[in-house]
Image (cartoon, rainbow, N blue to C red):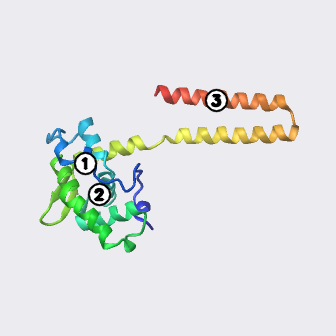
């Protein structure tokens, strides 16, 4: 099982590393001690794939891990391989990035408690809140899945009936109904 399969999470840019816009010099986020994060702070944390992966790993492993465990998992996730087959150079590149930049930044923002000397990382209440808000926005409501399935089955049945009966009028009516249903769904989703 690959590292990506061990955690149920979605990331947009596997292998994304720190960029100039993600440098330590541009950190203007608030550093309040509250257990909730502002939108700027949330985006600052979630904009980087490695930090999202760290949050997901901590969330799925009782909120704590060692830097080595995190580096192994992030490396395997970015390379889409099992932890057993990552190379030492791959691991080192990720370890240094986490150790020197990402974990201290997450600690400064009170997302994790990071003990550099012991090499341990623990998720804070604020970190849990950020991850939950990220997960909530990533999930598609199940009702839409059932509705989409219904429309797909309706469309397949319509094609089968029209082919069997070879009537253009039936095909036109069935696909018109399906199109109106899809437009209704799209309009509803755009308004919510």
C-alpha separation, residue under disc 2 versus residue under disc 3:
42 Å
Residue appearing at x 20%, y 61% in the figure: 99
Vertical position of residue 93 compared to residue 52: above or below: below
Residue occupied by mark 2: 58
Element at label 3:
helix
Element at label 1:
helix
Residue occupied by mark 3: 181
Vertical position of residue 118 compared to residue 141: above or below: below
Which image quadrant for residue 146?
Answer: top right
Residue 149 on image: x %, y %:
62, 42
For residue 127, the mark is 1
Mark 1 Cα shell of 10 Å, populated few (<14), some (14-19), many (≥20) = many
Mark 2 Cα shell of 10 Å, populated few (<14), some (14-19), many (≥20) = many
Residue appearing at x 31%, y 45% in the figure: 47
User: Are dots 2 and 3 in contact, CB under 8 Å?
Assistant: no
Give the quarter of the figure containing the N terminus: bottom left
Residue 56 on image: x %, y %:
33, 54
Residue 148 on image: x %, y %:
60, 39
């Amino acid at each position: 099982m690959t590292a990506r399969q061990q955690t149920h999470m979605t990331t947009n840019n596997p292998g994304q590393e720190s960029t100039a816009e993600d440098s330590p010099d541009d950190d203007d986020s608030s550093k309040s001690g509250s257990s909730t994060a502002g939108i700027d702070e949330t985006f600052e944390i979630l904009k980087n794939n490695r930090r999202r992966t760290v949050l997901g790993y901590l969330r799925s492993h009782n909120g704590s891990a060692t830097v080595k465990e995190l580096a192994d998992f992030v490396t395997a996730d970015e390379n889409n391989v099992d932890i057993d087959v990552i190379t030492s150079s791959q691991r080192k590149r990720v370890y240094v990035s986490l150790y020197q930049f990402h974990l201290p930044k997450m600690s400064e923002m009170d997302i994790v408690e990071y003990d550099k000397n012991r090499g341990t990382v623990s998720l804070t209440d604020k970190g849990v809140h950020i991850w939950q808000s990220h997960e909530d926005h990533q999930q598609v409501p199940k009702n839409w899945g059932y509705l989409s399935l219904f429309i797909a089955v309706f469309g397949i049945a319509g094609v089968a009936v029209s082919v069997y009966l070879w009537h253009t009028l039936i095909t036109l009516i069935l696909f018109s109904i399906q199109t109106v249903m899809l437009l209704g769904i799209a309009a509803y989703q755009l308004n919510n």
